[in-house]
Structure formats: C-alpha cells, structure tokens
C-alpha cells in the first residue's frame, strides 16, 4: 500500500447543486485526508492545461466551457492508494454506466456534468496537484 496524493475537483455542477458537503463527506468517511482545498473559478487557460490530453476530442470545447462556467472545489486528497481509491469511488466517466454506490452512479445523469474529477494515475496526479497547488498550501 502506497501513501499517495491525488488531485480531486468537485466540478461546477457539484457546487451549483450544493453537493460539496455530501461529496467531501464520502471521501472523509472512507478515511481519506484532505490536505489542501480551494474554491476556484477556473479560467480557460487553466482548464485547457488541465485537460490538455483531451484537446483533440470532439467534446473538448464543451468540457472547457463547463469547468469554467462556475466555481469548483479543487482539493488534494491523501491516503493509501488514494489515486485508485478515489477513481473507484467516482465511478465510470459516463454516469449512465456508473455503478450505484459510486458518486457518479448515485448523483449523475449527464456525461459532461459528472460531478467529480480525480487524477487517473501517478503521473497525472503529480502534474495536476502541482498545477493547482503550491507545496506550501498543503498541510504536512
Ligand atoms: P474521467 O473524468 O473519468 O477521467 P476523461 O475521459 O478524462 O474521464 O474525460 C474528462 C471529462 O470530460 C469527463 O469527466 C467528462 O466531464 C468529459 N467527457 C468525457 N467524455 C465525454 C464525451 O464523450 N462527451 C462529453 N463530455 C465528455
Ligand atoms: Mg480523466
């Protein structure tokens, strides 16, 4: 078991729907630790950098518009195998396929507005944590 940091974002639909408390509560009940958190309005440049690997996808523009459309809660979450644990808690990308019991399975009905982002591996976790937070903003 590796103690990992992962980047998690509660997307603008989660904030708009007042689900922030509930979704943080799920992560905390799992015994994951929030070591940094900030409510932010993501600008176009940051959204495009964050999702750079998807820039050729047909839905890229729609995705950038969605994540820049309102405040989002950016977090760094830490715990044993945190990257894959958070991914499992999120559920499948498409909420229509996501298993009940997962966040997307329980709260989502829209492929773009799927509530939560979590890094998909160690490389992206490192990159995304550094993109959104300074080392000094994370509690030790
Ligand atoms: P992930 O969030 O489960 O890692 P990615 O493939 O990395 O999924 O896609 C990033 C985000 O882009 C998704 O969470 C969702 O908001 C959006 N998205 C993914 N696929 C589609 C699509 O086919 N149509 C519209 N939006 C999509
Ligand atoms: Mg992804």
Image (spheres, grey):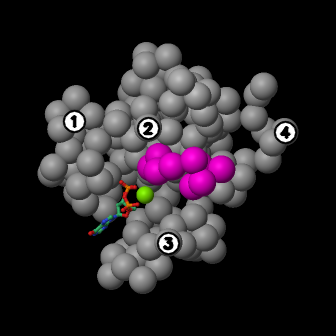
Q: Which residues are magenta?
A: 117-126
Residue pointed to by mark 2: 84
Marks 2 and 1 sit apart, C-alpha to C-alpha, by 19 Å
Which residue appears at 34% of the width and 36% of the height? 88
- Element carrying mark 4: helix
Numbered marks: total: 4
Could you say which disc has been placed on residue 106 in the image? 1
Mark closer to the chain start, 2 or 1: 2
Q: Residue at x 50, y 39 (%)?
A: 83
Question: Quarter of the picture for ligand 1?
Answer: bottom left
- Rate crowding at label 4 as few (under 14), some (14 to 19) or many (20 or more) other CA atoms within 10 Å: few
Q: CA distance from mark 3 to mark 2?
A: 19 Å
- Rounded to the nearest angstrom, the CA distance separating label 1 from label 4 is 35 Å
The magenta stretch spans residue 135: no
Q: Is residue 122 magenta?
A: yes
Separation of marks 1 and 3 at Cα, in angstroms: 27 Å
Task: Give residue 101's position: percent from left, percent from top.
Answer: 22, 29
Kindly report which numbered mark, 4 or 2, lies closer to the viewer in this rendering.
2
Tell me the distance, in whole angstroms, between the alpha carbons under discs 4 and 2.
Answer: 25 Å
Q: Position of residue 1 (x, y in %)?
A: 53, 24
Q: Earlier in the sequence, mark 3 or mark 2?
A: 3
Residue labelled 3 has its Cβ within 8 Å of some atom of ligand 1? yes
Neighbourhood count class around disc 3 (C-alpha, 10 Å): few under 14, some 14–19, many 20 upward: few
Mark 1 is surrounded, within 10 Å at the Cα level, by few (under 14), some (14 to 19) or many (20 or more) other residues, namely: some
Answer with mark 1 or mark 3, whichever residue precedes in sequence.
3
Which residue is more in the foreground, 109 or 5?
5
């Amino acid at each position: 078991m590796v103690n990992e940091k992962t980047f998690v974002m509660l997307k603008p639909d989660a904030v708009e729907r007042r689900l922030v408390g509930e979704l943080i509560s799920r992560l905390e009940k799992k015994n994951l630790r929030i070591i940094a958190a900030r409510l932010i309005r993501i600008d176009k440049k940051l959204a495009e950098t964050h999702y750079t690997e998807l820039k050729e996808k047909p839905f890229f523009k729609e995705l950038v518009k969605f994540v820049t459309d309102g405040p989002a809660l950016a977090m760094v979450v830490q715990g044993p195998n945190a990257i894959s644990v958070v991914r499992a808690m999120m559920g499948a990308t498409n909420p229509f396929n996501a298993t009940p019991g997962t966040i997307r399975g329980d709260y989502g009905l829209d492929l773009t507005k799927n509530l939560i982002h979590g890094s998909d591996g160690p490389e992206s976790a490192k990159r995304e944590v550094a993109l959104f937070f300074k080392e000094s903003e994370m509690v030790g």
